[in-house]
Image: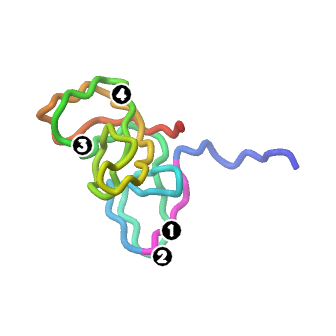
Amino acid sequence: MSATFIHDGCYLDYTPPADVLAGAVVVLADALGITRRPIPAGTLGALAMEGVFDVARTPGGVIPQGTRLFWDAAGQRATLTGVDPVTAIANRTLGIAALDSPDTAVAIRVRLNHFG
């Protein structure tokens, strides 16, 4: 069977088992998406799979633009660490820093992408 184009993939359909707030980072197996609107439990919604978002970040240290970032699901924040040092569980790739982030920042601007 040949491939049939469906849509550009900027968003993926998502039906959450529990209510999800707008701006939530959602882990989908090996990928991450972000809600732009709240999605009630059991209701079809959409996850942004591309774009630039401000998300909470691990404190301390300057993070230069273009740096690869991971999602710490337990801490609900972006991190430089690919593996959680406490649990030894792999953190999913979130994207890259879209801007330099100073060491005093509590959030970081991230361009979502899904590379290895």
Q: Is residue 68 above or below residue 46?
A: above
Q: Is residue 83 above or below residue 113?
A: below
Query: Upstream in the sequence, badge 3 or badge 4?
Result: 3
Q: CA distance from mark 4 to mark 1?
A: 31 Å
- Give the residues drawn in magenta, as a range: 11-17
Q: Dot 4: what SS?
A: loop
Which one is closest to the eye, mark 3 or mark 2?
3
Identify which residue is drawn at 32% across, 54% down: 23
Classify 10 Å Cα crowding around label 2: few (below 14), some (14-19), many (20 and above).
Answer: few
**Res. 35 in view:** no
Query: Upstream in the sequence, badge 1 or badge 3?
Result: 1
The amino acid sitting under disc 2 is Gly
Numbered mark located on residue 42 in the image: 2
**CB under 8 Å between callouts 3 and 4?**
no
Looking at the image, which is closer to me, 102 or 61?
Answer: 61
Place of residue 63 in the rendered image (x, y in percent of width and height, measured from the top left): 26, 28
**Res. 109 in view:** yes
- Please name the residue that numbered disc 4 is placed on: 67
Q: CA distance from mark 3 to mark 2?
A: 30 Å
Identify which residue is drawn at 48% across, 37% down: 113
The amino acid sitting under disc 3 is Arg
Magenta stretch contains residue 5: no
- Please name the residue that numbered disc 3 is placed on: 57
The amino acid sitting under disc 4 is Thr
Looking at the image, which is closer to me, 25 or 59?
Answer: 59
- Please name the residue that numbered disc 1 is placed on: 15
